[in-house]
Image (spheres, grey):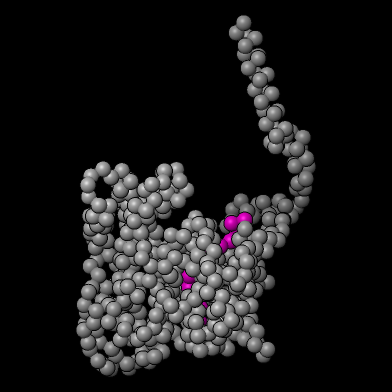
């Protein structure tokens, strides 16, 4: 009897496998056809041998494109020095502060200037912690299985971000020179501290959802934020509330020495420049309707600040705005899919840098819209757009961004991109309203289309 049962089980298993194959699995006939479709030619074997022992980028580097791009630009913003975010995801913060840095260097004719990234990052992490805890309170009535709640607990904190965070943080906390609150090991290597704070926030989030005592949720949240603040102080230092700073001209001569608060320092050197209202983020996302305003729910750094909001424009309109800003010597916050076709040793972004098709023997024909829709491309890194090269007809041929990977990376710390690459992998720039035509500004009056916080196009830039 046992033998017959075993046979029956075997037949049932075979039948189950056959049923699965009939429903979409790889059948033996299909596998035979797949194998026959591969021809093991000499070229195939050579490629296989090369791939077995070498990195794909090295093998795919296009030898016909190794000559360095001409580094002359017809229009270039005045900048001095290259910053370095080290092993941190703070590109968004470095980029935003580099835009201000270029403006201050130009206006006051300085030899150099750098703001403290550590100072604003301290408050960024505190504000994001409050954002998470308050969002947990706001969604307490929803089950843990709700997608919004699930997203919150998956993403309680990050060191990445975008321009709205820069503007909200600066307008709320001001800025300080780098030497007033310098970088340290933890600010240059943010992941470990961030992971520990995330763990604590998830613990606090559960406590807020399960709260049984009579304290108000805000009182409990405040106690939790005290602990987060102490963790941040240990990691990054105490943010200054007042400091003395000396302004020197480009020859090093003292101009004046004064005592400032972070907000009075910003007011002294940037006057009434309102980063929250004077700038507009424009996007080129061909997967969504152009000339529409979009907003991403819960995608902000400060709870009482602004959600990520942008105007989606065709690429030619984005270029025109960027060119107008550069011609007026004003740098811009810029973000892109930096990992695509980046040749680090030259510091160039060029769709011809790598020939993956020849190496792998297949085509990769998707356009920008198709790549966005299939999650193959999206913005991953923010840099400062500082230069464009225009031909005799005024058309751009190449662009340059100031990066934050140190002076040894790329071309003198910068990345040069062809105009074709710009069209394919640039996603957004932040432009002062004075460079935007009135008819385009009028589009901002429409009610934004609200997108969910988990939309994959809007992961924090790092």
Q: Is residue 343 left or right of residue 198?
A: right
Give me the residue at 31% from left, 77% from top: 175
The answer to which image quadrant residue 94 occupies is bottom left
The x and y percentages for residue 208 are 30, 48
Location of the C terminus (image quadrant): bottom left
Residue 319 location in percent, x, y? 60, 79
Tally the numbered discs: 0
Q: Is residue 260 visible?
A: yes
Q: In this rendering, is residue 455 above or below 390?
A: above
Tell me, yes or no, whether the highlighted magenta stretch contains residue 382.
yes
Q: Nearer the viewer, residue 320 or 334?
A: 320
Q: Is residue 92 found left or right of 252 in the rendered image?
A: right
**Left or right placement of residue 245 versus residue 318 in this view:** left
**Quadrant of the rendering where the N terminus is positioned:** top right
Q: Residue at x 30, y 71 (%)?
A: 119
Does residue 421 show up?
no
- Residue 307, percent across and down? 44, 65
Q: Nearer the viewer, residue 428 or 453?
A: 453
Picture residue at 25% right of the left edge, 87% below the top: 246
Q: Is residue 439 above or below residue 216?
A: below
Magenta residues span 374-386
Name which quarter of the figure residue 92 lies in.
Answer: bottom left
Does 10 lie within the magenta span?
no
In the displayed structure, does residue 138 sit left or right of residue 426?
A: left
Task: Locate residue 254, reporting x and y percent.
Answer: 26, 92
């Amino acid at each position: 009897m046992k033998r017959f049962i075993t046979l029956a089980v075997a037949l049932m298993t075979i039948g189950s496998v056959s049923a699965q194959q009939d429903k979409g699995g790889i059948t033996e006939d299909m596998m035979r056809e797949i194998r026959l479709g591969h021809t093991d030619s000499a070229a195939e074997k050579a490629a296989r041998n090369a791939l077995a022992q070498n990195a794909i980028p090295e093998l795919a580097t296009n030898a016909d494109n190794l000559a360095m791009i001409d580094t002359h630009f017809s229009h270039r913003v005045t900048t001095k020095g290259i910053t370095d975010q080290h092993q941190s995801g703070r590109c968004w913060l470095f980029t935003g502060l580099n835009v201000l840095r270029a403006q201050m260097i130009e206006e006051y004719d300085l030899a150099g200037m750098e703001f403290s990234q550590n100072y604003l990052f301290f408050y960024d992490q505190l504000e994001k912690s409050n954002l998470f805890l308050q969002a947990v309170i706001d969604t307490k009535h929803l089950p843990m299985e709700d997608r919004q709640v699930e997203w919150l607990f998956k993403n309680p904190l990050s060191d990445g971000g975008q321009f709205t965070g820069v503007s909200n943080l600066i307008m709320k906390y001001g800025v300080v020179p780098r030497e007033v609150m310098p970088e340290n090991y933890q600010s240059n290597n943010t992941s470990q501290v961030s992971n520990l704070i995330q763990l604590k926030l998830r613990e606090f989030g559960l406590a807020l959802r399960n709260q049984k005592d009579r304290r108000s949720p805000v009182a409990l949240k405040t106690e939790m934020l005290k602990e987060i603040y102490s963790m941040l102080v240990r990691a990054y230092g105490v943010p200054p509330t007042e400091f003395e700073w000396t302004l020197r001209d480009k020859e090093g001569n003292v101009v004046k020495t004064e005592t400032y608060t972070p907000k009075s320092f910003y007011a002294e050197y940037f006057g009434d420049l309102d980063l929250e209202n004077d700038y507009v983020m424009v996007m080129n996302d061909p997967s969504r309707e152009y000339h529409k305003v979009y907003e991403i729910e819960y995608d902000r750094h400060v709870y009482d600040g602004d959600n990520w909001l942008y105007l989606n424009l065709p690429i030619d309109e984005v270029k025109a705005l960027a060119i107008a800003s550069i011609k007026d010597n004003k740098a811009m916050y810029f973000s892109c899919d930096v990992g695509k076709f980046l040749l680090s040793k030259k510091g160039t972004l060029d769709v011809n840098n790598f020939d993956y098709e020849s190496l792998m023997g297949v085509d990769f024909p998707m356009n920008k819209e198709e790549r966005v829709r299939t999650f193959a491309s999206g913005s991953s890194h923010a840099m400062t757009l500082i230069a464009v090269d225009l031909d005799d007809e005024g058309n751009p041929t190449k662009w340059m961004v100031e990066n934050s990977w140190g002076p040894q990376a790329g071309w003198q710390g910068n990345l040069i991109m062809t105009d074709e690459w710009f069209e394919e992998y640039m996603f957004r720039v932040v432009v002062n309203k004075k460079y935007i035509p009135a008819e385009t500004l009028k589009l901002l009056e429409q009610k934004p289309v609200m997108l969910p916080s988990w939309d994959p196009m809007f992961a924090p830039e790092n």
